[in-house]
Image (cartoon, rainbow, N blue to C red):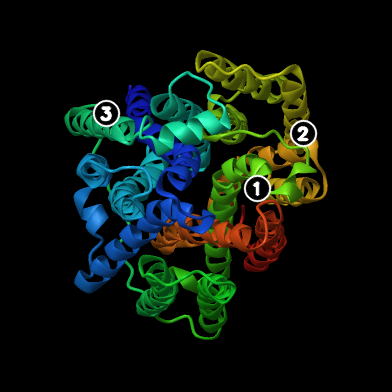
Amino acid sequence: MKDQNNKSALTTLVTVFFFWGFIAASNGVFIPFCKTYFNIDQFQSQLVDFAFYGAYYIGALFLFILSSSIKKDILNNWGYKNGIVYGLLLSAIGAFVMYPATAGAEQGQTTVFYFVLVALFIVGLGFSLQQTAANPFAIALGDPKTGSHRLNLAGGINSFGTTIGPIVVSLVIFGTASWTTEELANRISNNEITLITVQILYLCVGLLFLAAAALFHFSKKLPALKSDTAFEPANKARNILILLTIIVLGCFGYIFSTYIGDEVTSESLENTRLILLIVALVGVVGCLLFAYSSSSKKAEGWGAMKYPQLVLGMLAIFTYVGVEVTVGSNLGELLKQAVNETNLNTLGLPTLNDAQLGPFISLYWGGLMIGRWVGAITVFSPSKGLKKWLLIIVPYVAFGVIILVNWFGGKTFSTNEILFFAICVAVQIGGFFFAKDNPVKTLKTFSLLGVFAMLVGLFSSGNVALFAFLSGGLFCSIMWPCIFTLSIAGLGKYTSQGSAFLVMMILGGAIIPPLQGKLADIFNIQSSYWIAVLCFAYLLFYAFRTKTVLDKQGVDY
């Protein structure tokens, strides 16, 4: 009976995972639309990710600092259930703020774009609270040893949201009509396509948030669980995170000021902006490496950060979220730029406009769904023989769902497109068979495939280049649970705090996409994907390094 109640509770819990995926992947369509509608550059368009994912970091950091000051875990005091309810209510406020933020806005009004960012930031703050509560909640709903499998199952639902989100948002904003690039530009410039549809979309999303909050609040099957772990102070960890925040906000704050003023954009100014973005990135990496070095010499005051696997894992989550988001968020610009830059015409990439991007962005995020559905197979405890067949069948069933969702949205993929992605899925299946559910081996395998895919995308053309970049979603799909599991292995009483630190590092989705956007502004969109190569390369290094660290500690993983 208890097991049945836990299954009912898990069913309710995964609804929030769906929301996260739906909104996050929708940004892939919303970003290129904002760039066209508000007349902004690629860096500015990526501020959608900065606001959204930056809120995850700020929210989690604020909770940690506040808990440190009163020496009590605030979220644990509320309980996981109430934490999710409060997060949903906060996200609802952000969704409703979108309406007055964009009221009466017309094409080319760049200042309105910054109000849009405020609304998205509030939505992200709510998501931060939800995610901080929902991840340990899912683990607590059963045997801790199978907690990662429940996270995979929830991740599969999350990825279903990422698959349909771009399609729904594309339909809402552009309708079912297939405009040519010139027709679409004329309609936007003549205010025939406006932000009214975006306002209606977010009003509906806000109402769904309220409905979900009510579902959680009144659900008798959802227990108000709390962690039994006492709050562990970590003053040095808190201070280094505050320093990290000051560096990031200082760099981005100055860059914002150069856009808001009347200063004419010059090559020198663009280079200064790029340097500051690199400084922000180096600041994050530098602070974490300082924590890694200092805590190894004197562990007192560092809390969970005294464990090297956690600090390395924080940087791994930072780069993982960064690469997952940046590949998808800049994909729309890659496909649009072929009409604007003669140096990209030779690549033979499909030339698309804002209204045509949704299916390909859906395919990218659908790749994450495929991998997470495979990762969730273990939840159902199949026999070894059946599991081998499921490893082959489930990915193509998930691929069929992606094709079907797009078909309902009015997009039919060509035979060549289906064949190219099917080959990519086959490579992913081979990776699963090779890794054999071992988190270190899985991370090594898919990081290496990620590096290879990005290099193929950089040095090839046509469908080979396009689907190499799209396959990034397939190879990112299974990384979160692997990194999370390895990072908190052996933390003992610091496990809860370590989990909170890892959630903070979703910050990577706020910093890496804008950096790639500025690289695209200065160089070109395709060459900007070198940033993705570096991210996958670090994840490969992390897989090797963390194995050494855990083996030295004698930790079972």
Relative horizontal placement of residue 87, taking residue 387 as reference (left or right): left
Decide: few, some or many residues near mark 2? Use Cα within 10 Å; few <14, some 14-19, many ≥20. some
Which circle, 1 or 2, is nearer the viewer? 2
Which numbered tag is attached to residue 204? Answer: 3
Query: What secondary structure is found at the residue carrying circle 1?
Result: helix
Q: Quick one: 376 or 508, which is closer to the camera?
A: 508
Q: Position of residue 454 (x, y in %)?
A: 74, 49
Q: Residue at x 23, y 41 (%)?
A: 104
Q: CA distance from mark 3 to mark 2?
A: 37 Å
User: Which residue is labeled 2 in the image?
Assistant: 463
Q: Is residue 485 visible?
A: no
Which numbered tag is attached to residue 439? Answer: 1
Which circle, 1 or 3, is nearer the viewer? 3
In the image, residue 199 above or below residue 548: above
Answer with mark 1 or mark 3, whichever residue precedes in sequence: 3
Q: Residue at x 55, y 72 (%)?
A: 266
In the image, residue 92 above or below residue 172: below
Q: Is residue 35 visible?
A: yes
Q: CA distance from mark 1 to mark 2?
A: 31 Å
Identity, as a three-letter code, of the amino acid under mark 1: Pro
Which circle, 3 or 2, is nearer the viewer? 2
